[in-house]
Amino acid sequence: MEKPYEPDVKTCVQVMNHDGVILYPTDTIWGLGCNAQSEAAIDKIFEIKKRSPQKSLVLLMTDVKQLSRYLANPLPDLETLLSQFTQPTTIIYPNAINLQSKLISPQGTIAVRITHDPFCRSLIKRMRQPLVSTSANISGEAAAANFSEMNEAIKLKADYVVKWRQDDQQSQSASTILKLEDDGRFTKIR
């Protein structure tokens, strides 16, 4: 049986394969997303958000195996470390590799959230690569708690707006952000 969000997934993949930007629900707040290998789409996200390219974007991934492809020195017990988080948590990892330079900070780090959201996981699996994700707001403005509260300018500038969960009125909040230190400890950023 086809999942109710399957038509959106198919359209998102087509749009992202042609350097487009999507507006979509995540496991936290609504996000702007694109193909992590598309420099043009990444540039468009910075333009839509009016955000400095020096500020990092988050990547959504499905699991530690996928994440390990983008880290030069993944910790051997990374999966165990991450299993302690029950809420959506974005982690800043050192020694990023194999990604567009615009996704790697000047310090060589990347911000990644392993998502458990079925819609997002389906998108990532179809794309066979990480999904760029950033809050769907103009830089400096508060992120919308749900789709109906979102700035109309953001909705108009995305190449595709996902229909799935637009009517959901439940307030969502951004993820916790932690930085993974070299010794395996976490420092809370947000």
Image: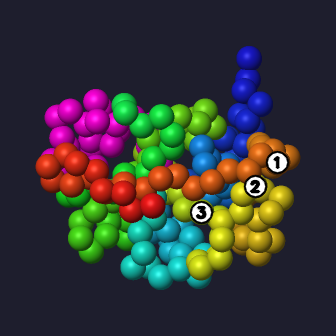
- Disc nearer the start of the sequence (2/3): 3
Residue found at x 53% / y 34%: 116
On screen, residue 32 versus residue 160, left or right, reads left
On screen, residue 99 versus residue 128, left or right, reads left
Q: Secondary structure at mark 1?
A: loop
Residue type at mark 1? Gln
On screen, residue 164 versus residue 70, left or right, reads right
Asked which quadrant contains residue 168, the reply is top right
> Which segment did they paint magenta?
60-82
User: In this figure, which residue is indicated by the disc labeled 2?
Assistant: 146
- The picture places residue 27, in percent across and down from the top left corner, at 60, 43
- The picture places residue 153, in percent across and down from the top left corner, at 77, 75
Asked whether the beta carbons under mark 2 and mark 1 sit within 8 Å of each other, the answer is yes
Within 10 angstroms of label 1, few (less than 14), some, or many (20 or more) residues?
few
> Is residue 93 in the magenta section?
no
Asked which quadrant contains residue 62, the reply is top left
Is residue 163 visible in the rendered image? The answer is no
Residue type at mark 2? Asn
User: In this figure, which residue is indicated by the disc labeled 1?
Assistant: 169
Q: Secondary structure at mark 3?
A: strand
Front residue of 42/176: it is: 176
User: In this figure, which residue is indicated by the disc labeled 3?
Assistant: 135
Residue type at mark 3? Ser
Distance of label 2 from label 3 (alpha carbons): 11 Å
